[in-house]
Image: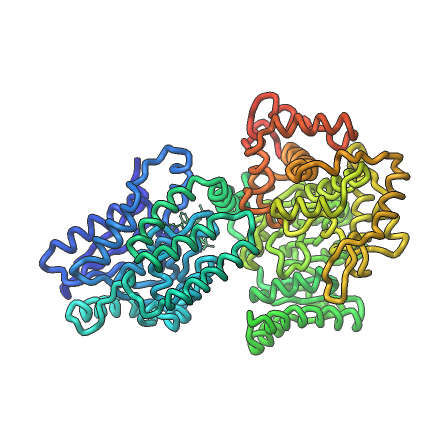
Amino acid sequence: MANKGRAEMEVGADGVALITIVNPPVNSLSIDVLLCLKDNYEQALSRDDVKAIVITGAKGKFSGGFDITAFGGVQGGSTEQPKIGYISIDLLTDTLEGARKPSVAAIDGLALGGGLEVAMACHARISTSTAQLGLPELQLGVIPGFGGTQRLPRLVGLTKGLEMILLSKPVKGEEAYKLGLVDALVPRDELVKTARFWALEIAACRKPWIRSLYKTDKLESLGDAREILKFARAQAQKQAANLQHPLVCIDVIEEGIVSGPRAGLWKEAHSFQTLLLSETCKSLIHVFFAQRATSKVPGITDLGLMPRKITKVGILGGGLMGSGIATALILSSYPVILKEVNENFLKAGIDRVKANLQSRVRKGKMTQDKCERTLSLLTGVLDYESFKDVDLAVIENVSLKQQIFADLEKYCSPNCVLATNTSTIDLNLVGEKTKSRDRIVGAHFFSPAHVMPLLEIVRTHETSPQVVVDLLDVGKKIRKTPIVVGNCTGFAVNRMFFPYTQSALLFVDYGLDVYKIDRACTKFGMPMGPFRVADLVGFGVAVATGMQYLQSFPERVYKSMLMSIMVEDKRTGEATRKGFYKYDGKRKASPDPELMKYIEKSRNMAGVTPNPELMKLPDKDIVEMVFFPVVNEACRVLDEGIAVKASDLDIASIMGMGFPPYRGGIMFWADTLGANYIFERLEAWSKMYGDFFKPCSYLTERAAKGIPLSAPANQTRARL
Ligand SMILES: C[C@H](O)CC(=O)SCCNC(=O)CCNC(=O)[C@H](O)C(C)(C)COP(=O)(O)OP(=O)(O)OC[C@H]1O[C@@H](n2cnc3c(N)ncnc32)[C@H](O)[C@@H]1OP(=O)(O)O
């Protein structure tokens, strides 16, 4: 098998061995790279002409950490691993850090995870000011495994070290220097030269020879450290009660502080090994690759098309979505022209963008100066005159979309991409009156558009691949995760979201408690249960959406009257301070005993007698009752070719619905339970409660054949 990366060594006349990690695209530390590093070290330590060593990464990137692609092989048992502690103790601690020749890390681009851990084992670190340094392993369900749990707190102090590790939050070179994580900041073109000089200075005892594993000056006293760790444990549990690995990480750090760093390294090595095989780690690794795979669309991104340069974006409508989209675009340096129908609406739209930016200033995410420079990219207009040179026009929720598209066709250049932000409108209808159907595309942002990470790119049969490639590129530049989907009511995310609320409403009619359902969902890991979400969004939207679904999918909509009854009583959610919950002045939700009268009315209208047995159900059953219909719908979305692959739906469920990432997304989670189990439960419920639960043919077939729901179906033709 071909080697996965290497480390190259070159010995200079100055007596410095320069070791370069070469493993594109991010110089990850594969086992091959690490074994090369070991060979290089053995050579450098034995050669008389080598006085000191510098480690760097090829092409401006130190290293993105351990090779994540190898995790899958280890988890599946197909890749053999080095023995426990071999990399962190034998190689990095005893060979590199314990060597009688000094090492200096020359860091540019990124030093993440194992990359930073290699750098911390060196005796000094020189960095550029823009490099990113961090230990993001917890994001992947593991802990730092090459000594990071021991060395980072010793270099930057326990509080900062915990923050960086538990929040997977990297720092820029500049901050790393202030924290003491790096020893000097230099411009990129002086990086290696300075590191060489520094290494020779250490060898000549003119600069300190520091083994960070044994540093104690930054560590708090044992009593203080215990208090800090206690607080960190409480925070970790509060933030994600279902996750074990943050607590394991804190235990490992504590071991090093209480019993010494060597004991800490051993505990780290054993814990890393155990966590690597956990369901959480498998799920999070799946999510890492699934997220990157969303921008790989068969038949679109494999045609060799290059994205065209988008230099200016026109937005029609400065409402909530239009202003949010404008904010997202100017934040990524796109000049934007915002068009409204009159002065008042235009001012309101621009004020919304200003408020979005000001909120970033207040939170310390942006300086006032940067805020003003960003705002200068936005121009408000009342006519189409300035649309001549826009490359992308995004139409927000304005009526007469057809007319607007016909107007745009007259005013914009023939190459301008025409995008519409809609969650429901049929794109084929929108383009009906134009000759430009090939450049019409949906750009479904989620509210608030400048904050939510997901972007559904909706294509019709006629949308050209070039236009999709262009929008994928814009999505990446504005830091959204784009999912390419076909045209249908609700696209992928809302189609999956709808049964979530529907199922919850059905079971309330049949006797379950609103608050019990919400609690079961939040314990499962959802940020909010379906009823709390409905309050947040407002019932107006939910009722209107329900009507559209009823039209499109009449055979599987449960017609609950509960929300409509509440709307009649002007009880429409958080905005009216009363929905399924009641809200105080600070938007704090609490259960409302009055709700029962609406529920009883809804049950009467449905002609349903509540079953008291349902209230005795454990949370697990409630979660399945709410989510299996979502799985069923996700299967239909996949079967119809609306989504091109199951992992796209995993990302859509995580980023669009708040499905817990540590469960891997809706389809990944479903496969951990098995298609057959889900089929049987849905089938049983469909007999008791009706067609809403009826398993679709995709699910039925896979359950019968024992095929995972996520397995690609080559026979499924994309219907768009
Ligand atoms: C023992 C140790 O403690 C354990 C570890 O080190 S675990 C690993 C810790 N490191 C990380 O978590 C970093 C993960 N990577 C990232 O956050 C980002 O990829 C990055 C910041 C490095 C680069 O981001 P960006 O420039 O946007 O590029 P991105 O699209 O994410 O990645 C480029 C490619 O590199 C791959 N890649 C990134 N990091 C990788 C890694 N550590 N191993 C293997 N492949 C990696 C991606 O999968 C992607 O591949 P693709 O082009 O085939 O889709």
Residue at the image point whose x is 59% and y is 53% from the top: 471
Q: Nearer the viewer, residue 87 or 35?
A: 87
Answer left or right for 719 relative to 168: right
Residue extending furthest toward the left: 48
Q: Quadrant of residue 312?
A: bottom right
Residue at the image point whose x is 30% and y is 43% from the top: 84
Query: x%, y% of residue 704?
Result: 61, 21
Q: Count every numbered label the image shows and give the total.
A: 0
Image quadrant where one finds the N terminus: top left
Query: x%, y% of residue 2?
Result: 30, 38
Query: x%, y% of residue 150?
Result: 34, 58
Residue at the image point whose x is 60% and y is 40% from the top: 666
Q: Nearer the viewer, residue 110 or 623?
A: 623
Using the image, determine if residue 178 lies above or below residue 577. below
Residue extending furthest toward the bottom: 369
Q: Is residue 462 visible?
A: no
Answer left or right for 592 relative to 107: right
Query: x%, y% of residue 31?
Result: 30, 44
